[in-house]
Amino acid sequence: MTSANRVTRREFVHDSAVVAAGAALGLSAPYHVRAGNPDKSDTSKIVNYNPDMEYRRCGRTNWMISAVCMGGHWKRIDTVVSRVRQGSGWINIGEGNPEFEKNRHEVVSRCIDRGINYIDACTGSEVKAYGKALKGRRDKMHLGFSWYEKEIRFGDHRTFKALKKTMQDGMKEANLEYVDLWRVTCLEDSHRHTDGELEELMKALEWAKKSGVARFTGISSHDRPHIKKLITKYPHQLDVIVTPYTAKTKLVEDQDGLWAAMKSLDVGWFGIKPFASNSLFKGTSKPGDPHEEEDNRIARLAIRHILCNAAITAPIPGLITPAQVDNVAMAVAERRELDLGEKADLERAMDRAWANLPYHYQWLKDWEHV
């Protein structure tokens, strides 16, 4: 961060308290700012505002978040970056690779150009990669932090002391003075955590907010009934949740369901896997792939469909090229409602995605209704 834009820890804690107090008094930002700002809303407090992007209020955080954001995962990055580390999967694939670091810098730069203002990093490598990519321009992005390998998913990281150390060590490794959101990655079936483990987690989240390490806090979970239970029980710690949300997902008007609870408690909501872990596409995501044009069109249809649900803050797809950033930004600018032909095309593509889902992503089918 440059000296002109540098935020001190004291200023950070003060600003967080002001936002929290404003929310308590009902002084919230408008629910959304549409592309082009036809309602003439005050955009001065929107991070990295671009008039071509739509922004949505992220629950009680009062952040105005771009209607599409960037997820931390870089699956298929090997189609655009050579010399990746073999045998390490997509998590650590780019560490120590200058070509990879250049790719991440370019993709983040295009996100900034397009008015995207949130990155959701949920592995150690992602946190480090995006910490480096944001050097000198940290003020352009809200950054979500999760170092899932050293969080509550694993038995030796289920105490306040261990979680606090994860946050402190992770920020040091990524050269971060603070994060905007610490959203701990729970077990997918988060009801498997004991009450004691969850109390330790909430203690850690509360510490992070009070100390100014994280402005807001939350969790990632795939367990709808348990998420509802947690946001009701811990309203001061769970400002934002991260859940699956695909183009198959439909919002159910159920006053006893998760969505109603999130709405009443004013919780922000980010959706992972909008492209069903790339099962939506026929091609490889490599530039010049024969299916590239059609896959891009289907990706835009999926984003438009998801954004028809005003309850969700933003889908957070993984993006591996500047062109993919351009494509999702284009989706926000296009007509929102799909016509009959587009609906049919997207439905066929999602049926194919469901048929092609790998076994370890079958749980996405549990999120057809929320």
Image (cartoon, grey):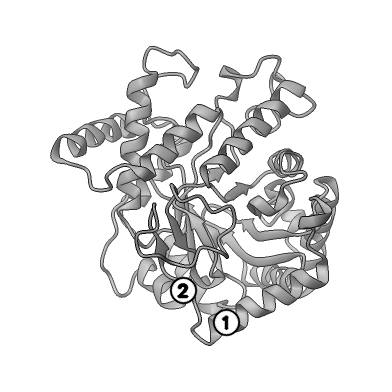
> Rounded to the nearest whole Å, what is the CA distance between mark 2 and mark 1?
14 Å
All told, the count of numbered labels is 2
Q: Is mark 1 on a helix, strand or loop?
A: helix
- Percent position of residue 276, x then y: 41, 37
306 over 207 or under it: above or below: above
User: Is there CB contact under 8 Å for labels 2 and 1?
Assistant: no
In the drawing, does residue 362 fall left or right of residue 100? Answer: left
Sort mark 1 into few (<14), some (14-19) or many (20+) by Cα contacts within 10 Å: some
Quadrant (top left, top right, bottom left, bottom right) of the C terminus = bottom left
Residue at 27 percent of width and 70 percent of height: 254
- Percent position of residue 330, x then y: 39, 38
Task: Name the amino acid type tagged 1.
Answer: Gly
Q: Which of the labelled discs sits on residue 83, or is there none?
A: none
160 over 357 or under it: above or below: below
| Residue that extends furthest to the left in the rendered view of this protein | 340
Residue at 32 percent of width and 50 percent of height: 249
Q: What element carries label 2?
A: loop
Residue holding disc 2: 266
> Is 16 or 247 nearer to us in this picture?
16
Dot 2 or dot 1, earlier in sequence: 1
Sort mark 2 into few (<14), some (14-19) or many (20+) by Cα contacts within 10 Å: many
Residue holding disc 1: 22
Q: Is residue 41 visible?
A: yes
